[in-house]
Image: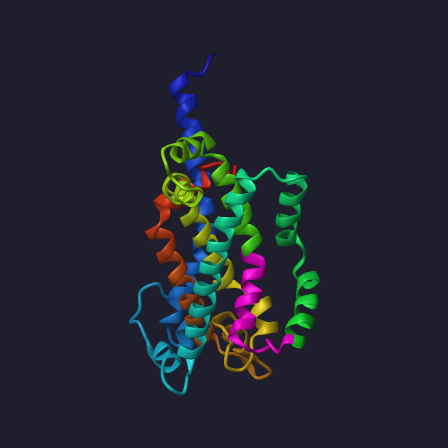
Amino acid sequence: MAVPNHVKKTVKNTFLYTIVTLALVWALLPIVWMVMSSVKTEAGMFSMPPKFFFKPNFETFKFMFSEEGNFFSFLSNSVIASVLSTIISLVLGTLGGFALARGNFKNEKALSFWIISTRMAPIPAVILPLYLMFSNLGLIGTMPGLLFAYTTFNLPFALWMMMVFFKEVPQALEEAAMIDGCSRFQAFWRIALPPVAPGLVATGILCLMFSWNDFMFASVFSGHDTQTVPVAASLLITQNGIAWGQAMATGTVIITPMVIAGLAVRKYLVQGLSMGAVK
């Protein structure tokens, strides 16, 4: 007996919804659990059975942002290093990506692949030569050193992404603008750049996330006065145990700005990632 098409469709949709629901639970449950634990007492955090309805306790956050907790310094270091390295990477990556997309370089494909291959290299292979160079230049433990380190892994990614985005824009539009009197830079600024704005936003958000979440580079290149939030989280694991309350609160602080930024620019993020760079 043949199964009707509407029954097949219902079964297929039920299966897909079940898979999506399980994936969402798998991805979001640890985050929800962490956020809930950040506003619980330590006893309430490990109570069995766990309580999903309780009176929030913000004492951990109050301590972290107090003078004794000193969390503002970690937070400001993360903001400065992440935002500035993203801006530097976007400016240089946009100009370099446009040059690669429009220039007639010899061995262009090999050059493009070499650029992105520096981003794909294992982190330990990059950290050691950078550490030697930064040590000789006196950049270890300084904010400029951290900025250079973040830009090292953000710039190849930004350059590669922007090159692909610019290749999606017909070169004939810029040639027509220059025939009408635009200079080369004006053709870039007025004609080529606006269509890739969603890609620029998507690249910026991804670079910001890479920098904000980084632990390896920050733990090696930052000093006592330039440590970032991920480094602060690692300091909560001591020989006497783990400060679970502060760890959960720190994790909540780490993910909150990126979630807000992602939601604020989700429209541009989807448009940018669908322009051809990530398929």
Q: Position of residue 24 (x, y in %)?
A: 43, 47
Left or right for 105, reference 231: right
User: Which corner quadrant of the image does residue 152 belong to?
Assistant: bottom right
- Of residues 104 and 139, the one nearer the viewer is 104
Q: Is residue 190 visible?
A: yes
Magenta residue check for 150: yes
Question: Which is more toward the observer, 88 or 7?
Answer: 88
Q: How is the image coloured?
A: rainbow
Q: Is residue 48 visible?
A: no
Secondary structure mostly seen in magenta is helix
At x 70%, y 66%, the residue is 129
Range of the magenta residues?
Answer: 137-154
Q: Say left or right for 161 vs 125.
A: left
- In which quarter of the view is residue 175 placed? top left
> Tag count in the figure?
0
Spot occupied by residue 89 in the image (x, y as percentages of width and height) = 50, 57
Q: Position of residue 144 (x, y in %)?
A: 53, 72
Residue 169 higher or lower than 112, as above or below: above
Seen from the viewer's position, the closer of residues 212 and 145 is 145
